[in-house]
């Protein structure tokens, strides 16, 4: 899953830049976050709750920063709006969805674990939701010949990152304080 997410980060970031799609680039960042989350989560399996909750807190903060960055760059794009390439957005969004559905199916049984494990589930869930949203944005861009659907989806994805970060940070804080 680390390899799938790393490859898809490269594919989506490149396609997002070529297609001038903020939504694809936001989804690419989610792939990068997943690859890092999986690696870090594997490294701390079996570690003390203090270590696992601290790692989960760091992951939550990184999601917060990523969400703020996507919001900021999306606001910048609102000022300078270009129309993304809908065909590239849709095709890459579909490819990404297939990759993420495989990850989600593998991880579904871990969605209610500790903060560290839950962060892995939330990142994978975010990716699948993001892929569907990118495909919807592609249809909107194609049908309306405007970049607004792309920007709206990027904004929604930033909100999803922020929401997930709040959930992970809250659960990590509770676990850290509960164990002391």
Image: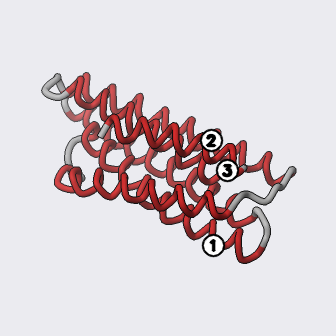
The image quadrant of residue 67 is: top right
Give the residue at the far left of this rendering: 46
Observer-nearest of 147 and 160: 147
Q: Which residue is mark 3?
A: 22
- Label for residue 126? none
Quick one: label 2, few (<14), some, or many (20+) residues within 10 Å?
A: some
Q: In the shown orientation, is residue 74 left or right of residue 175?
A: right
Q: Nearer the viewer, mark 2 or mark 3?
A: 3
Q: In the shown orientation, is residue 54 left or right of residue 106?
A: right
* Residue sitting at x 63%, y 66%: 138
Mark with earlier residue (1, 2): 2
Q: Which residue is mark 2?
A: 68
Residue 138 in the image: above or below residue 51 = below
Image coordinates for residue 35, horizontal then vertical, percent: 38, 35
Q: Tell me the CA gap for discs 1 and 3.
A: 15 Å
| Quadrant in which the N terminus appears | top left
* Residue sitting at x 68%, y 60%: 150
Circles 1 and 2: CB atoms closer than 8 Å: no
Which element carries disc 2, helix, strand or loop? helix
Q: Nearer the viewer, mark 1 or mark 2?
A: 1
Residue 108 in the image: above or below residue 59 = below
Which element carries disc 1, helix, strand or loop? helix
* Residue sitting at x 63%, y 72%: 139
The image quadrant of residue 39 is: top left
Circles 2 and 3: CB atoms closer than 8 Å: no
Mark with earlier residue (2, 3): 3
Q: Which residue is mark 1?
A: 139
Q: Nearer the viewer, mark 1 or mark 3?
A: 1
Image coordinates for residue 15, horizontal then vertical, percent: 61, 47
Quick one: label 3, few (<14), some, or many (20+) residues within 10 Å?
A: many
């Amino acid at each position: 899953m680390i390899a799938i997410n790393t490859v898809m980060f490269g594919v989506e970031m490149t396609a997002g830049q070529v297609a001038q799609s903020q939504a694809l680039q936001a989804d690419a960042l989610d792939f990068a976050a997943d690859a890092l989350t999986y690696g870090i989560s594997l490294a701390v399996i079996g570690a003390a709750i203090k270590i696992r909750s601290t790692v989960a807190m760091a992951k939550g903060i990184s999601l917060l920063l990523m969400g703020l960055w996507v919001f900021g760059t999306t606001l910048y794009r609102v000022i300078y709006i270009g129309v993304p390439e809908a065909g590239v957005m849709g095709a890459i969004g579909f490819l990404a969805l297939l990759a993420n559905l495989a990850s989600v199916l593998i991880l579904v049984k871990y969605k209610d674990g500790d903060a560290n494990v839950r962060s892995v589930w939330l990142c994978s869930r975010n990716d699948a939701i993001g892929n569907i949203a990118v495909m919807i944005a592609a249809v909107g861009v194609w049908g309306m010949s405007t970049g607004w659907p792309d920007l709206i989806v990027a904004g929604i994805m930033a909100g999803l990152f922020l929401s997930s970060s709040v959930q992970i940070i809250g659960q990590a804080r509770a676990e850290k304080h509960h164990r002391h």
